[in-house]
Amino acid sequence: MGIRHRWRAIGALLAALLAMLSGPLAAQNPGPGSDRIPVAVFAEQAPRAGEVWWLALRFTPVAPEWHGYWSNPGDAGLGMAAQWQLPPGWEPREPLYPMPRRLLVSGLMNHVFKGAYSVFVPVSIPAGAAVDPAAPWSVRLDYLACTDTICVPQQAQLSGTVGAVPRSGEISAWRAALVPALDRTATWERSGEVLRIGVPLPASVSLGEPHLFVGTGELGEGWQPAYAAAQTYRREGDLLVAEVPLQRLAQAPGGATQPVPETVEAILAFAEGTGVRFSARPGDVPLEGARPLAGPETPALWGLLLAALAGGVILNLMPCVFPILSLKAISLVKSGESAAAARREGLAYTAGAMLACIGLGALLLALRAAGEQVGWAFQLQEPGVVVALLVLAAVITANFAGLFELPALPLTRAGSSGGGFATGLLAAFVATPCTGPFMAAALGAALVLPAAQALALFATLGLGLALPFLAIGLFPALRRRLPRPGPWMERFRKAMAIPMGLTTLALVWLTARLGGQGFALVAMVALFGVLLALVVVGRLQRAGKMAWPAFGLIVAPFAIFAAFALPASLDRGAASEAESIHDPKPFDAGELRRITQDKTVFVWFTADWCVTCKVNERVAIEREAVRQAFDAAGVVTMRGDWTRADPEITAFLAEQGAAGVPLYLWYEPGEAASQLPQVLTAEMLVSRAQRAGRLGRGSLRGGRPATGTD
């Protein structure tokens, strides 16, 4: 070796030694303003061309009360920002973090790190790059150090040479604390005000109490995760479905919104502080067969089937079903059918009722699987369906009242299995808005059970509805116990016109609520034409003349008028919420989350077509004693009107395990919702309010200390 080369080698060795001596001091220089949570840089291995150079940023709070933040800090705080200066071609990638913790302060959810923690930064080195140990690097780190009461901005300026970044014997333990990556891609979708993520997680993984840390703070179109809101989880085999409520971003007027992201980054924390990180791409997240993880467990299937059966039987007492059942049974006795014919009639009626319930249930499940936010009795949210029911109820009322006779009408004549089948269809269809108090658990479970089990529940509901008439058709002893035919039957038939007439009037009011007064007026004109035609038919029948051609001639112009005028007069925004002595706030999921942090809240979900809802409001909610008790205890009221389709309300009902209305929720400050029974009493609400008032006087409302949750 020549003298010149020898001196070059000696010079390089001295430079390397100098770098090794001075590098640690320079690399550990925290820089100005990083006194609460100082940071140091360590290397996992020496840098090599074509490989990833792993650097660990070790943050060490000076006292236990100081905490740092995850990349997405949550409702408050600030994630770390890094400005790297590296050799040409060297690129820092996204940092990797350990599992954050949840810290709830004054209703704001923060994603934090308590104690010392390490953030790993992978640096890509190009293949063929000349790795010079003396090459300089530097980074400026801006982050936030906070206690539960104050926050101090931190800034660290770190630098050194790539060959002199120190190692640590603890770096393996630091790496072990990083959240491992899931080896599969998840899918995500936004459904109303809910972020739904399907995570392909093996069924063998124990979840404990899972929580999803959403790393992507903006989900496009002005939406962001509601970090403090309760998350819900469902599981089906190797698929975990997480649902995170959303809220609107606070933006300046006229501010542009971010586009929908290509991926959503998240960490799923589960049993004993373990978890996985993953990326989710847009796609369909199926709910079929997924069972809830949180909340009360789904009852056994046999219990749900019994509840559905009992609920269907009780539905026969409803004012829109009882007249149909009664006259159908009486007509069976009056006609003197044989035992075989009676059995056929009963079985046909049962088949019609069951098919109607199965059909409505299958349509409900299909719409929900397609991403539609619908619930049980969703058809009554459509003005056109309500108009059709209005006309049908009016025709039945006119027939019961004796205005006309239709020997082939299923409601008035036995002996035709087709007639029994049609009557069963009708009875099941008009009974759907009355199922609430009897079918809450079964219908709620039907939304998360496998399709076959859900359809079995709907079929059992139809069986229960048809059971009384089926029993009459199958057992002659029951038919013999019915009153003997006589003049009383005609009087009873006319008496049954009263509840059907009241049902017709209720449908007139509902038509106005759904479509506006103009829409209801057009429907009344069309209904007048139908009733006028039926009156003419009745007179011709009593005179022994051909009647039904006249019906067609009279109804035709009214039908043509309605076909054009009804769509033109429909006003979906006309109706306003009904008056209430409580002056409730309109339902808003974000507002509900905010006010339940420090106030007692009573929320009720109702619909104008829900008979049970209106009865509860009249006998329990809209009572002066209840209002006074609520005022004395400072109870805030909120009402969700589901008369018309409302995706936000539908999604919220599904979160609560409810398929429809009524639903009554009671929130104590800072606590989860408590579901009240679907049949309310005023005493029940007064008692709740008085207890809330006593608790309020014994504690400081709105001044609770912040709580942390791992």
Image (tube, rainbow, N blue to C red):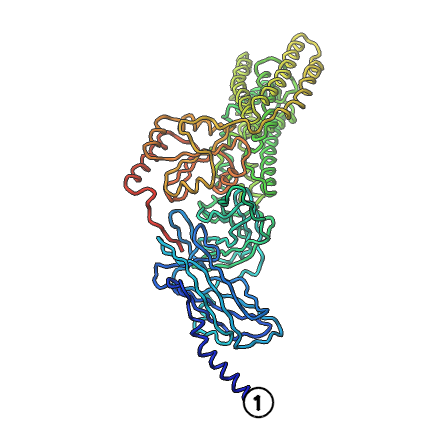
Q: On the rendered image, what quadrant is the C terminus found in?
A: bottom left
Residue 532 visible to an observer of this rendering: yes
Q: Nearer the viewer, residue 625 or 361?
A: 625
Residue 389 in the image, given as x and y percentages of width and height? 59, 25
Left or right of 524, for residue 17: left
Q: Nearer the viewer, residue 546 or 593?
A: 593
Up the image or down, 169 lies above or below 358; here it is: below
Q: In the figure, residue 370 lies in which quadrant?
A: top right
Circle 1 crowding by C-alpha within 10 Å: few under 14, some 14–19, many from 20 = few
Q: In the figure, residue 340 lies in which quadrant?
A: top right
Residue sitting farthest toward the top: 543
Q: Residue at x 55, y 64 (%)?
A: 93
Reading the image, the residue beneath label 1 is 4
Residue 181 in the image, given as x and y percentages of width and height? 53, 61
Q: Nearer the viewer, residue 254 or 448?
A: 254
Q: Nearer the viewer, residue 323 or 270?
A: 270
Up the image or down, 593 lies above or below 49; here it is: above
Q: Residue at x 52, y 43 (%)?
A: 193
Residue 80 in the image, given as x and y percentages of width and height? 47, 59
Kind of residue indicated by mark 1: Arg
Up the image or down, 375 lies above or below 549; here it is: below
Find numbered disc 1 in the image and state the secondary structure of the residue it sits on: helix
Left or right of 305, for residue 409: right
Residue sitting farthest toward the front: 4
Residue 237 visible to an observer of this rendering: no
Residue 21 in the image, given as x and y percentages of width and height? 44, 79
Q: In the figure, residue 645 lies in which quadrant?
A: top right
Label tally: 1
Q: On the rendered image, what quadrant is the N terminus found in?
A: bottom right
Residue sitting farthest toward the bottom: 2
